[in-house]
Image: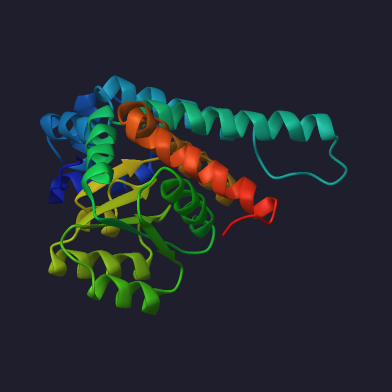
């Protein structure tokens, strides 16, 4: 579980987001002075976002900057060759995947998998690009036997959550963590005492402050033609598959029957023999 961030940690996060290049060259003491926080606050913050320490934070920032500053990834140019675009996109995606991998907290993954196993039902919510991740999770969760509903409409989501039992699990997806609709739904979940999970790229965000458990993804830059949205969805799907595969591995004997039954029914539908 990602702990709630203190005011000093939120201040530090804002400073890091504003000065990512400068921090790569700073000592922990220099950053503490510039951000007006203590060195201990920096170390705690690194641990909360899934890093081993300040050195890991600098490495992550350096990797993110490398693809942007050196031209490995930037705006697509007129007449650019397919081979160049392939190199740019692959570098962009690979960098984001490596950062996401380093930032994942296995403890949180295990906790979320346990919650998915114990829950009476899962309610998924995500908007715009994040709704693609929600649809993917909806199909996969139901197939392995986790009762799941999904919505990209706030009014419908509020209606469902209002009638939900405390055994329901709310899982929201928001890359920025600042979606007004997601924040409203998480506030309702807190009032209803429904456990909430957030899949986001920003640990220091309004939604992350409200969620009980936070799963972090990472992205690298974003251009005017919006490849950032595509990459963020890829990272979300990576984490969604991680949850799925860990769930199957942990509860294989239970899931196997559900998967077999699902496959048999699909085959019957295709053969028009169901019922």
Residue 162 position within the rendered picture, expressed as x and y whole percent measured from the top left = 23, 75
Q: Nearer the viewer, residue 1 or 17?
A: 1
Q: Residue at x 55, y 42 (%)?
A: 263
Residue drawn where x is 36% and y is 70% of the image = 181
How does the figure colour the protein chain or chains?
rainbow
Q: Is residue 131 visible?
A: yes
134 above or below 188?
above
**Image height of 117 relative to 70, above or below:** below
Residue drawn at x 41%, y 42% is 144
- Residue 176 position, x and y percent, is 41, 55
Q: Quadrant of the C terminus?
A: bottom right
Q: In this view of the protein, can residue 170 be seen by the observer?
A: no
Q: Residue at x 79, y 44 (%)?
A: 77
Q: Give the x, y percent position of residue 100.
A: 42, 32
Split into 4 quadrants, where in the image is the N terminus?
top left
> Residue 126 location, x and y as percent?
43, 61
Q: Quadrant of residue 39?
A: top left
Q: Nearer the viewer, residue 193 or 37?
A: 193
């Amino acid at each position: 579980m990602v702990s709630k961030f203190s005011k000093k940690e939120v201040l530090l996060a804002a400073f890091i987001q504003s000065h990512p290049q400068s921090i790569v060259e700073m000592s922990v003491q220099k950053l503490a002075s510039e951000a007006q926080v203590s060195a201990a606050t920096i170390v705690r913050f690194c641990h909360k976002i899934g890093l081993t320490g300040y050195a890991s934070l600098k490495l992550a920032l350096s990797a993110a900057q490398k693809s942007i500053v050196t031209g490995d990834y930037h705006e697509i140019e007129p007449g650019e060759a397919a081979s160049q675009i392939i190199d740019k996109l692959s570098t962009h995606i690979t960098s984001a995947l490596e950062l996401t991998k380093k930032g994942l907290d296995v403890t949180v993954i295990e906790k979320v998998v346990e919650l998915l196993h114990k829950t009476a039902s899962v309610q998924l919510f995500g908007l715009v690009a994040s709704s693609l991740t929600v649809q993917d999770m909806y199909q996969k969760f139901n197939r392995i036997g986790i009762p799941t509903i999904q919505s990209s409409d706030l009014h419908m989501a509020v209606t469902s959550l209002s009638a939900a039992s405390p055994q329901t699990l709310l899982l929201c997806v928001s890359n920025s963590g600042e979606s007004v609709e997601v924040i409203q739904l998480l506030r309702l979940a807190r009032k209803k005492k429904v456990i909430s999970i957030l899949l986001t790229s920003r640990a220091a965000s309004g939604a992350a402050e409200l969620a009980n458990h936070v799963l972090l993804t990472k992205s690298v830059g974003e251009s005017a033609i919006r490849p950032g949205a595509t990459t963020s969805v890829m990272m979300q799907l990576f984490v969604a598959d991680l949850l799925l595969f860990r769930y199957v591995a942990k509860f294989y004997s239970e899931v196997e029957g559900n998967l077999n039954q699902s496959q048999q029914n699909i085959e019957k539908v295709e053969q028009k023999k169901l019922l």
